[in-house]
Image: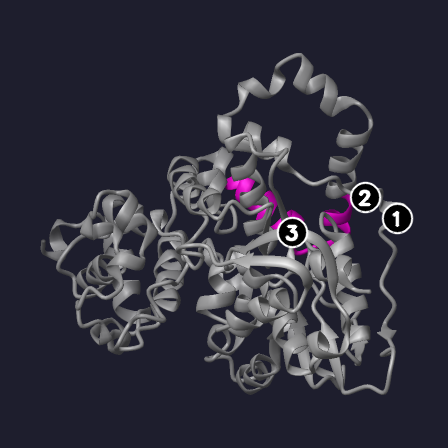
Amino acid sequence: MSQVEMTAREQAIQADFAKRMDETELLNCMQCGFCLPHCPTYLETGYQEAHSPRGRIALMKAVHDGLIAPDEEVKRSLDLCLGCRACEPVCPAGVNYGHMLEEARDIFEDHSTHSAGVKTVRKTVFEGLFPHQNRMEKAMSLVGFYQRSGLQHITRKIGFMKLFPESMQAMERAMPNVLPQKERKAHKRVYEAEQAPVATVAFFKGCLMDTMFYETNKNTIMLLQKAGCRIVVPDSQGCCGALHGHSGEKAKAQEMARKNIDAFEDSGADFIISNAGGCGAFLQDYSHLLSKDRDYAERAADFTAKMKDISQILVEVGFHERVPLKLASKRITYQDSCHLRNVMKTASAPRQLLQAIEGVEVIEMEKADSCCGSAGIYNIIESEMSMQILDRKMEYTKATDATTVVTANPGCLLQMKLGIEREGLQQKMEAVHIVDLLAEAVQ
């Protein structure tokens, strides 16, 4: 298709593709197909090439070169991708697919034609809620009130939730109980190690993690103290920006990245620790996100170099070798967080920690490294595909006959809870964050 045959909007998108997409990166894809068996959407769509990593790269390249119009079919292909980045570790050419996907989505979003309703929702979520921790606190307090006041019981009893899609009904049932705000105490600036400190770490507390999963953050600090870490919790830190970066809101993600770099620079920490695989991976990508920012590029690279997942730092300082860990008999399986494994390259550390717990049997799940279908808000906006992927994941989960499914990311945790709910396994199986399991095991 020639450029003359494109609409004015499509011409503008194509021009941005030509200007902003990294042509060298696009050309790096050899179209070998090593990525195909690792791509959830390629498998779930019946091997449709347009829904594979190499297919999407081919579409990006064709738009970049002006060979096809950046129409709704191209956008749909990009939107259906989970961004799990399972294609990257198996790519012999080392193609940075995730970076290209985010840039392409951002270009489309810059020329979006959303309805007034969608624009309002996006503005509320991306500008009004997640960048402001105090608003997140209030929102989660409302969720907690809904759960404790009897409203949840009434809503379920009168069948109000039946007005929503089945996946959202199950998600509402699987949502963890949110502590009252008065019980979610503000973190101290500094926590001292329980012994002679072996490292000083700065803790990224996150937004959902410090509200909906406050107990997990509290347990993270306790584990780090027992591991011999002095912990600094910067006051001015905020949301990591992952939700924005994955949804075509690049400028806002960059703004949030700068804020976090400013917050952590004076911490004096040897490492920056996250307990959420999705957040940690995006934090580690700050060096790419701000690579063209003259004032922040070098600072972002320094920030990235310090990023570690909680499981990785615990293994490196020998926590599991010094601290006795024991639980009553449990049969455990581990579900990898895609971003923790594929971006942060952390896969063995969580397994080492689980193996160190006395009294548990750890069963390796088949395709533990495959996506569960959560992917931020993907399970809401692409519910049908998300549930297909989750149902497949639950087949592998049930085959382990585990009583406990362990993961290391809040989105994965909620998704696995949802899977257990959908399968009616609540009396036989539970899903927990690895931090909370380790905290329970500490003797």
**SS of the residue at dot 1?**
helix
Q: What's the residue type where badge 1 is placed?
A: Glu
Percent across and percent down for residue 206 are 68, 60
**SS of the residue at dot 3?**
strand
Would you place residue 170 above or below residue 243 in this image? above
Outermost residue toward the right in this view: 182
Q: What's the residue type where badge 3 is placed?
A: Lys
Q: Is residue 126 magenta?
A: yes
| Real-space Cα separation, disc 1 to disc 2, in angstroms | 6 Å
Specify few, some or many for label 3: CA neighbours under 10 Å numbering under 14, 14-19, or 20 or more. some
Specify few, some or many for label 2: CA neighbours under 10 Å numbering under 14, 14-19, or 20 or more. many
Which stretch did the figure color magenta? 119-138
Percent across and percent down for residue 183 are 88, 48
**Residue 430 badge:** none
For marks 2 and 3 on the same chain, the one whose residue lies earlier in the sequence: 2
Q: Are marks 1 and 3 in contact (CB under 8 Å)?
A: no
**Residue 179 badge:** 2
Q: Is residue 396 magenta?
A: no
| Real-space Cα separation, disc 1 to disc 3, in angstroms | 30 Å
Which SS does the magenta portion mostly show? Answer: helix
For marks 1 and 3 on the same chain, the one whose residue lies earlier in the sequence: 1
Q: What's the residue type where badge 2 is placed?
A: Leu
Q: Quadrant of the C terminus?
A: bottom right
Percent across and percent down for residue 364 are 48, 58
**Residue 330 badge:** 3
Outermost residue toward the left in this view: 1
Question: Splitting the image into 4 quarters, where does residue 15 fall?
Answer: bottom left
Q: Residue at point 77% right, 87% down?
A: 198
Percent across and percent down for residue 146 are 76, 30
**Residue 183 badge:** 1
Residue 443 visible to an observer of this rendering: yes
